[in-house]
Amino acid sequence: MTDRDPQELAEMLQGMLQPWHEAIANPAKAQEDVLHTLLEGYAQTEYGAQHGARQIATIADYRRAFPVATYEDYQPLIQRVMAGELSLLLSEEVIGWAITRGTTKGESKFIPMTPTDLTMRINAGRAMMNYVFTNGRFDLFAGVNLNLNFPSVVGTVQVGEQQVEYGYSSGIYTKYVSALTPIRSVPAQEEIDALGGGKTIRDWEARFELAYQKCKDENVTLVGGVAPTTLLFGRYLRRQHGVYPKDVWQTQIMTLGSVPGINTHYQPALNALYGPAAIREIYGATEGMFGQQRDERRAWVPNYDLFFFEVQTRAGAKMLHEMKPGELGSLIVSTPVLPRYKIGDLILALQSPYFRCIGRDRWWTPLAYAWGELNTFNLGRL
């Protein structure tokens, strides 16, 4: 990658970023196009056929035909898919079963990952690619990505007569498609998986030690993953080896997700540990990667060209791109697997096309967000 001409790299990145930028410029058209693509897939499933996916022509038709559904609504269907009834929800094979790190009413969620889904997840790299393209930092590709992802296999679950392996979406993604991304991840996902799927402090320290030993002589230009894990790794290095990440590497950019407030609550600690790296937020979940930070403005921009986005507001359901600055809504996202899925995240609209996920859809979340903004002296600023 580093031997390629900068002009060639610029053209390659521009081609990868263009669908995103075009969709941001005209979200209404992009969302109509995405819906039609999704409906073609839904029509090949039993659930889609039951709701008349082939007969749907408009967004209004889609809303009338398909109900908004939570994970609790989908759970019986997902359990049947895990038992072998793939065509119930899927139009293609299952690559892996992803488990959430959080819980829904005390139970972990299981989400099937398909080839289409994995390909779509590559686009979380748009945050890094846009940084490289706009700043001309093609030297980032001369380094490696510090891989602090979770294991791709952590256990099995008995479903009917089948034993089904499951792991974390970030690990499954890295295992299958890291070769298609423009920067090498170290350590390899297979090396992380070989340590097992344990969740204890000792298990995580073993992963951190592997990452340090594999990367200490590498040029780490990118750190991507889960923000709290990235902080824990930096503190582990200081405690175990007497160094901070900034003493070992000159990281250019950190693309991080999993929690709200990455560019406010987490940013000071991240920069204290890793140095003056650019921080870009990724907004996603086990169900998909829905948006990423585009520039210095501390909010993410949706992948309008990949997913169909609605929100439930006080005034009813509307398109995400129709939200006004300051408006709140509970996200409803349609993925290749889950139509009109109410994911349980509360979204705040800022100046178009910028959004923030401020937390789970709970009555106290806006109060907690406002208090956090006050304490970090941000007060909603981009």
Image: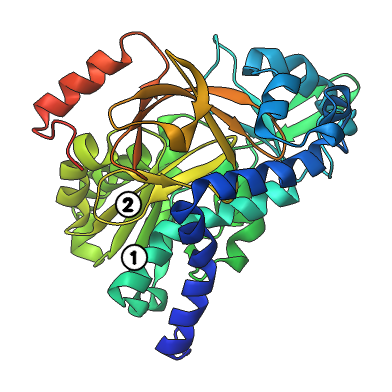
Q: Nearer the viewer, residue 382 or 30?
A: 30
Q: Is residue 215 visible?
A: no
Q: Is residue 255 above or below residue 258?
A: below
Disc 2 and disc 1: Cα gap in Å? 9 Å
Q: Are marks 2 and 1 in contact (CB under 8 Å)?
A: yes
Specify the amino acid type for callout 1: Tyr
Q: Nearer the viewer, residue 298 or 273?
A: 298
Q: Which sits earlier in the primary sequence, circle 2 or circle 1? A: 1
Residue found at x 39% / y 11%: 362
Relative placement, left or right, of 277 versus 167 is left
Q: Is residue 239 above or below residue 361?
A: below
Residue found at x 48% / y 81%: 11
Residue 156 position in % (x across, y down): 73, 29
Which element carries disc 1, helix, strand or loop?
helix
Relative placement, left or right, of 70 versus 11 is right
Checking the image for residue 184, the label placed there is: none
Circle 2 residues within 10 Å: few <14, some 14–19, many ≥20? many
Q: Nearer the viewer, residue 72 or 29?
A: 29
Tell me, what colour scheme is on the image? rainbow
Residue found at x 24% / y 42%: 263
Residue 374 position in % (x across, y down): 11, 25
Specify the amino acid type for callout 2: Arg
Residue 356 position in % (x across, y down): 34, 35
Q: Quadrant of the C terminus?
A: top left
Residue found at x 73% / y 47%: 37
Q: Quadrant of residue 31?
A: top right
Check disc 2 and report the residue beneath it: 280
Which element carries disc 2, helix, strand or loop?
strand
Check disc 1 and report the residue beneath it: 131
Residue 371 position in % (x across, y down): 16, 19
Q: Is residue 72 above or below residue 192?
A: above
Q: Quadrant of residue 364?
A: top left
